[in-house]
Image (cartoon, rainbow, N blue to C red):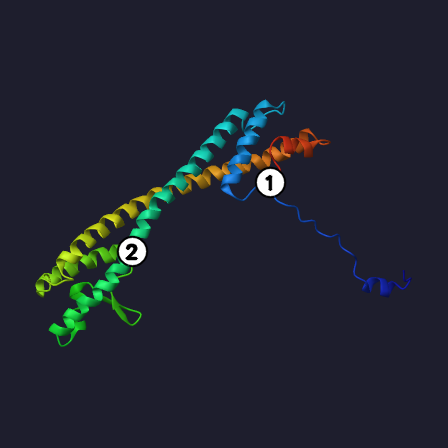
Amino acid sequence: MSSNPAESAATPAKTAKSVKRAGQLPTNAIALAEVATNAAKAWQDSELPALLWLTKADFAAQTAAFAASRDEADAAGDARTPQSKRLKALDKVFNKSLAYVKAYLTEAQDDKTAYYGEFGIEKANKTYQLPRNRAERVKALDKLLAALKTHKFDKNKYGTAHWEPLAAEYRELVAQTTETSGQRSGKVSTKDQDEEQVRKTLRALIHHIKAQFPDTFEARLREFGFQKESY
């Protein structure tokens, strides 16, 4: 080591390396529910006392509520999937069928685009199509059906007999999807709130175990289900 004060001052002091520790709790909601359920049961059977702000029984109820809200949110998402797939399929049918309606207008009118608005057709990205927004598309389909009759295209192959059943199905599916989306949003919000409370309690429980069992807390944490290698 140099005895030169200037040289010593110029040498930066070594800093302690920061230690990055793995999270004690899983990020996945399914795994978190399992950990919480196991921890609640272990706590009920343990001599470890309750927290000042939460009893063992209340945590068991809290955990059960979280597991239930998670299942409900997942179920609501599953219910929406078939509806969404069918809507996408109908959108493709509409896009293909609309080409024939445009062809009818091309034959009947010199300036077909002047009548597109009457048929619910709008310009988007340099192309003319039905609105992308599904609620607006429902309205456009109503305009299309009316215009087909006005311009005497209703008896054509791609006239009202083709469009009416598709439009009716589409209208119903959009209504169902809107309702399901609202229900799912509510259930997801409830699940998120329940999850936040469960995480808060589990973090407190980990510190509680460490404080009460300073020499054996690692083994105790495993007994309570806090096994990081499993999640």
Question: What element does badge 2 sit on?
Answer: helix
In the rendered view, tell whether residue 187 sits above or below residue 173.
above
| Left or right of 97 in this view: 217 | right
What kind of residue is marked 2? Ala
| Picture coordinates of residue 131, whole percent (x, y) | 26, 61
Badge 1 density bin: few <14, some 14–19, many ≥20, Cα 10 Å: few
Q: CA distance from mark 1 to mark 2?
A: 41 Å
Q: Which quarter of the rendered picture does the C terminus lie within? A: top right
Q: Mark 2 — residue?
A: 89
| Residue 230 - label | 1
Which residue occupies 60% across, 33% down? 225
| Left or right of 43 in this view: 126 | left
Circle 1/circle 2 CB separation < 8 Å:
no
Which residue occupies 14% across, 69% down? 104
Examine the rendering and report whether any part of residue 130 can be seen.
no
What kind of residue is marked 1? Ser
| Left or right of 220 in this view: 115 | left
Q: Residue furthest bottom?
A: 110
Q: Earlier in the sequence, mark 1 or mark 2?
A: 2
